[in-house]
Image (cartoon, rainbow, N blue to C red):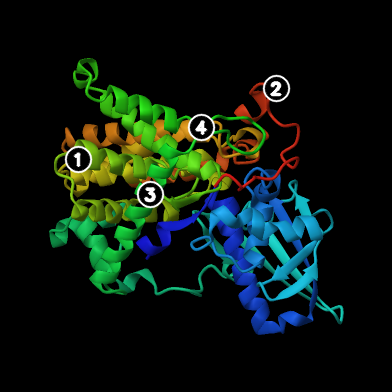
């Protein structure tokens, strides 16, 4: 079972697959290396990046994320305000303090290798970490960042049928591997989707722990929106993209009580846009965000949840928990049967997945039964099919930030449309998830997070000439 603890994680921007995942891979490497030998015997470390991690690694801060991980920092706990200080000795003195305890010489130009034309067999997001000992022996591990901050090692990749980490899905009270099975379980036991997921979660943890985690995720999402509405300036990376959320927030607050705005039936849409922009500007700036299910699509679920909080009279903390639990079911189905990785299936796997998750969750909040929720999710994915991942300059800024605003509005519309129906739909959620997977397989690689196609190529001349010409600056976080 893919748990809510797995799907929603507090991490660091700008990318769950290219920043959070590589940092976690570095953490895993340190843990594995420590079991293999004493860290004091290490004289050098080399980093190799492959495929999409190499193609857009600079814009996604993949290199600095790995370095932070090797220093001993984790995505969920790192103080993003201090990242420049953490990295300074590496860039100024060419010294890497492995796990914060053992200093070695490290040169980013010499010890990081970028193989953007080489894709390893299992997944386009691959990295290899190698430790060289004083006696000349090597210890190395290959990791795959498969989207949403999920990381597997080479053993997991080459032996997919073996369970290395978690109990099998048939242990939980209400197992499901498809939307059809999920609907049947709900109908057979008279459960909502959120109640079913909660029962499965409580098979491994007590309800108090589950609720505490859900509340922390929701609180982090709200904090992220607040920070995004307060911060201004230019986003790092070289595109000179100006943050818009603060100005939009001030504008909407000033208009809130004006007669024209009060009579505007679509005023909520402007606020949904704001919430999404605020989150994704924080993400682009390297701040703390919640993978939902990825960083590139991190603004959609928080935006729709804020819409629920601020524009629906039925809001409650219990409802917020139900929202996240319902969304977990949909995200789990997509991850199991297709992908949430932009490098694997394009942005349909990121924005499309987040849109479907938010649509289903909101449909339950609006009173929709499980069939209507699955219909809402199907609409959310169906109308994002074929969406490419073409970040300009390798940065998670254009078109990513606005794309979240559009995805959030689309999710609200999908939920409302589904709740006006009877839950029946021509194309099932299972079929549309399968279609997403096939579409992703058919999509040219240049449209899957490589910055070699689409807007990344055909935008104007403000695009940096090479994605490796800059590193994300965290100093404004």
The disc, 3 or 2, on the residue closer to the chain's N-terminal end is: 3
Bin the neighbour count of mark 3 within 10 Å (Cα to Cα): few under 14, some 14-19, many 20 and up.
some
Q: Foreground: 190 or 267?
A: 267
Quadrant of the image containing the N terminus: bottom left
Bin the neighbour count of mark 1 within 10 Å (Cα to Cα): few under 14, some 14-19, many 20 and up.
some
To which quarter of the image does residue 104 belong? Answer: bottom right
- Left/right of residue 162 with respect to residue 97 in the rendered view: left
Mark 3 and mark 4 in contact (Cβ < 8 Å)?
no
Mark 4 and mark 2 in contact (Cβ < 8 Å)?
no
Q: Nearer the viewer, mark 2 or mark 4?
A: 4
Q: How many angstroms separate mark 2 from mark 4 (CA)?
A: 20 Å
Q: Secondary structure at mark 1?
A: loop
- Left/right of residue 249 with respect to residue 150 in the rendered view: left
Q: How many angstroms separate mark 4 from mark 3 (CA)?
A: 17 Å
The percent position of residue 420, horizontal first and vertical second, equals 16, 32
Q: Which residue is mark 4?
A: 243
Q: What residue appears at the point 39 percent right and 34 percent down from the top-left corner? A: 407
Q: Secondary structure at mark 4?
A: loop
- Left/right of residue 60 with respect to residue 183 in the rendered view: right
User: What numbered label is drawn on residue 423?
Assistant: 1
Counting the numbered discs, the total is 4
The disc, 1 or 4, on the residue closer to the chain's N-terminal end is: 4
Q: Which residue is mark 2?
A: 461
Residue 126 in the image: above or below residue 287: below
To which quarter of the image does residue 471 belong? Answer: top right
Bin the neighbour count of mark 4 within 10 Å (Cα to Cα): few under 14, some 14-19, many 20 and up.
many
Q: How many angstroms separate mark 1 from mark 4 (CA)?
A: 40 Å
Do we see residue 430 in this rendering?
Answer: yes
User: What numbered label is drawn on residue 223?
Assistant: 3
């Amino acid at each position: 079972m893919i748990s809510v603890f797995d799907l929603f994680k507090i991490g660091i921007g700008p990318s769950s697959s290219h920043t959070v995942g590589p940092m976690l891979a570095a953490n895993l490497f340190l843990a594995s290396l420590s079991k293999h030998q004493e860290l004091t015997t290490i004289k050098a470390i080399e980093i190799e990046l492959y495929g999409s991690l190499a193609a857009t690694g600079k814009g996604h801060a993949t290199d600095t994320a790995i370095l932070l991980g090797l220093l001993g920092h984790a995505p969920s706990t790192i103080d993003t305000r201090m990242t420049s200080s953490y990295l300074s000795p590496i860039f100024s003195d060419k010294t890497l303090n492995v796990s914060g305890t053992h200093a070695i010489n490290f040169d980013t130009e010499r010890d990081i290798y970028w193989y953007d034309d080489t894709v390893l067999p299992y997944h386009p997001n691959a990295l290899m970490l190698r430790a060289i000992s004083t006696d000349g022996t090597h210890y190395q591990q290959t990791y795959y960042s498969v989207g949403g901050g999920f990381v597997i090692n080479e053993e997991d990749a080459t032996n997919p049928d073996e369970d290395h980490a978690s109990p099998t899905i048939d242990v939980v009270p209400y197992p499901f591997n498809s939307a059809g099975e999920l609907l049947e379980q709900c109908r057979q036991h008279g459960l909502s989707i959120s109640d079913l997921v909660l029962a499965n979660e409580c098979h491994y943890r007590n309800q108090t722990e589950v609720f505490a985690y859900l509340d922390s995720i929701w609180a982090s999402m709200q904090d992220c929106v607040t920070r995004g509405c307060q911060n201004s300036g230019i986003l790092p990376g070289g595109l000179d993209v100006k943050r818009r959320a603060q100005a939009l927030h001030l504008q909407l607050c000033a208009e809130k009580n004006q007669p024209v705005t009060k009579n505007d039936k679509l005023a909520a849409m402007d606020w949904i846009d704001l919430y999404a922009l605020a989150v994704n500007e924080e993400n682009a700036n390297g701040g703390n965000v919640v993978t939902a299910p990825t960083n590139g699509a991190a603004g959609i679920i928080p935006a729709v949840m804020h819409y629920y909080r601020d524009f629906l009279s039925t809001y409650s903390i219990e409802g917020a928990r139900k929202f996240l639990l319902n969304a977990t079911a949909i995200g789990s189905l997509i991850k199991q049967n297709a992908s949430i990785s932009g490098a694997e299936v394009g942005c349909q796997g990121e924005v499309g997945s987040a849109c479907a998750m938010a649509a289903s969750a909101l449909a339950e909040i609006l009173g929709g039964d499980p069939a209507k929720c699955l219909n809402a999710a199907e609409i959310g994915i169906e109308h994002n099919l074929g969406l490419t991942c073409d970040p300009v300059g390798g940065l998670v800024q254009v078109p990513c930030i606005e794309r979240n605003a559009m995805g959030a509005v689309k999710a609200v519309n999908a939920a409302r449309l589904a709740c006006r129906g009877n839950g029946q739909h021509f194309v099932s959620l299972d079929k549309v998830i399968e279609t997403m997977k096939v579409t992703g397989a058919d999509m040219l690689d240049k449209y899957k997070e490589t910055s070699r196609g689409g807007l990344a190529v055909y935008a104007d001349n403000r695009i940096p000439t090479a994605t490796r010409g800059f590193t994300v600056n965290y100093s404004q976080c």
